[in-house]
Amino acid sequence: MIFYILQVVLFQVLFLLVYDIALSKETFFTKNRLYLLSTTVTSFFIPLFKIETLNEVVSQEYTVLLPEIVLSPQKVIEKTSWYQSINYVEVLFVLGMMLFAAIFFIRLFKLIRLIHNHKKSSYKSYTLVLLPKNTKAFSFFNYVFIGEELTGEKKNNIIKHELVHCKQKHTLDLLLFELLKIVMWFNPMIWIFQKRISLVHEFISDEVVSKSSEKNNYINNLLSEIFQVENISFVNQFYKKSLIRKRITMITKKRSKQIKNLKYFLLAPIVVIMLFYTSCSNNQKSNIVVTSYSKEDSFTYNDNRLMWPSTPFYNINIKNKYALYDVPLSMTGVIPTYPGCEEGDRDCFNNKIKEFVIENFDFDLLTKSKPHNEVYVHFTITKKGTVKNIKTKTEFPEIEKHAIEVLKKLPRMKPAIKKGKIVEISYYLPLMYKIKKT
């Protein structure tokens, strides 16, 4: 999940750089609005797409090394502590979502109160809400909020301006970013994109209104008075002091030449590069060798399958262990789903296996063996989601038998999927334990 989030942020940074460098100074305001909306949404989906021809071809039964599990009596003590099972990152994430959702609904309620508590005038395509004793001017969907102290031509131009926001449904754009801010509140790019698109909204409205009125008069209206500003990020505000200079610059700017529309074609190679990156990331061929220090015994990785030796082995050296730990989802499609986990959630799968083994392993049995030892377990999750082909290697037959019994108790899972087909997948689980004997 963290890697996915980092990819989303990275892609949004790249899209924003293209916009700021190549597109933001052009007068293709409607196209810029579409660019900002589409790239923001696209950045969430690109990491999910994989180009199959770029993926390394693997056999349907692929053996994956799980993170090692350290067994000790101390683990029994740790697992009884309730705080050990809390995922503080998830708790922080949910609390952040709740906070920003609360802020959104408080501001939405504030708008609803303004609508119900003030004088309204209904027209064919909009409703005018008059705000007493102020000079605020903003819109929300088909509601135009305007201060009663604004009169004459200034008031008419402001209403014309806000009606453009209403007709072009700019509020929907801003609400999309409000939703993204709730779901991904920790991503600063969402705020930056929302500011960019708010400015584009103003450019669009200014362009429409300035065509129907004399530009100099319209600019003078912008500069003549500092309007009050409503501190709500999802309303279209007529006046924001920080944006006035940019708006005036765009109003007086010559229209961009049509040839500059070609700049938007920059998006195509950028998206292709991103797709290439997501398809190939963490998908490099692994040079994996597992060998024994014994003279006769060996354990090798060949043809994407783990080959077990005919004789016991004790000391094992694993080269390039990280490559096995980090087998990408694209190589198996969707890994098996442990009950209670989201589909294909590898971290949840690993943690559930670990919790299950620690909970079901007989720690008293370990005291009968050496103080330091390892148990290596190989098992396969079938197309039905059950466990089969459980094999172990250790010096102590009792522990070997017990490890097999523990793995047999694993619950039925949703099987792995490769290219739309259900497949078997094998796992290699190292169990390490240390016992302090008195």
Image (tube, rainbow, N blue to C red):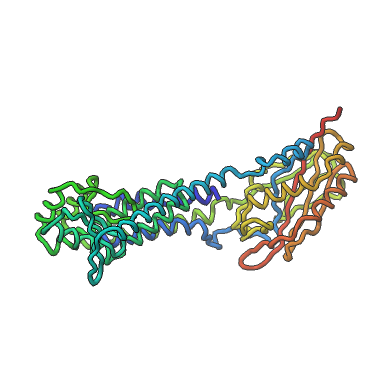
Residue 337 sits in which quadrant? bottom right
Residue 413 sits in which quadrant? bottom right
Q: Residue furthest top?
A: 438
Q: Specify whether 188 is left or right of 246.
A: right
Q: Please say whether residue 265 is visible from this viewpoint.
A: no
- Front-lying residue, 99 or 175: 99
- Front-lying residue, 270 or 229: 229
Q: Specify whether 193 is left or right of 49.
A: left
Q: Position of residue 65 (x, y in %)?
A: 70, 49
Q: In the image, what residue occupies the spot 75% across and 52% down?
A: 306
Against 321, residue 381 (above or below) is below
Q: Position of residue 30 (x, y in %)?
A: 28, 62
- Front-lying residue, 225 or 262: 225
Q: Please say whether residue 84 is visible from this viewpoint.
A: yes
| Quadrant of the rendering where the C terminus is positioned | top right
Q: In the image, what residue occupies the spot 43% across and 56% down?
A: 179
Q: In the image, what residue occupies the spot 86% across and 35% down?
A: 370
- Front-lying residue, 240 or 108: 108
Marks counted in the figure total 0
